[in-house]
């Protein structure tokens, strides 16, 4: 299994809009920065491609 760490709240919301749910959210140990962990699936990759296309 491969995982994607998302540190951008806007990207997390865009993925949620595509009905992609994160596995967990956490804080980094050193900087206490929030991130969301996603499993890379076919649906995740399709949603990411759609997001990339709409940002151009």
Image (tube, rainbow, N blue to C red):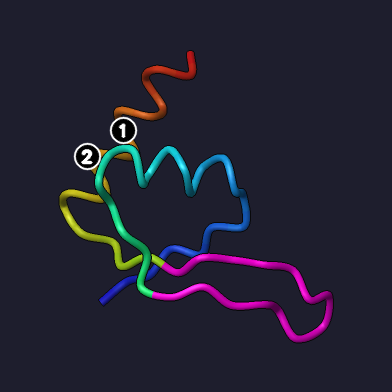
Left or right of 10 on screen, residue 22? left
Give x and y (percent) for residue 38.
Answer: 37, 65
For label 1, count other residues whose C-alpha is less than 10 Å away and answer few (under 14), some (14-19) or many (20+): few
In the image, residue 38 above or below residue 53: below
CA separation, marks 2 and 1? 5 Å
User: Which residues fall within the magenta stretch?
Assistant: 24-37
Which residue appears at 48% of the width and 19% of the height? 55
Based on the picture, tell me whether residue 3 belongs to the magenta stretch.
Answer: no
Residue 41 quadrant: bottom left
**32 in magenta:** yes
Asked which secondary structure carries label 1, the reply is helix
**Mark 2 vs 1: CB contact within 8 A:** yes
Q: Residues within 10 Å of mark 2 (few under 14, many from 20)?
A: few
Q: Residue at label 2? A: 46
Choose top left, top right, bottom left or bottom right for residue 7: bottom right
* 52 shown above or below 25: above
**Residue at which label 1 appears:** 49
50 relative to 12 in the view: left or right: left
Residue drawn 26% across the image and 46% down it: 45
Image-based side of 50 in relation to 35, left or right: left
């Amino acid at each position: 299994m491969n995982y994607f760490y998302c540190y951008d709240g806007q990207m997390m919301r865009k993925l949620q809009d595509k009905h992609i749910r994160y596995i967990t959210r956490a804080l980094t140990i050193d900087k206490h920065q929030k991130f969301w962990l996603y499993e890379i699936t076919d649906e995740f990759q399709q949603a990411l491609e759609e997001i990339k296309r709409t940002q151009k």
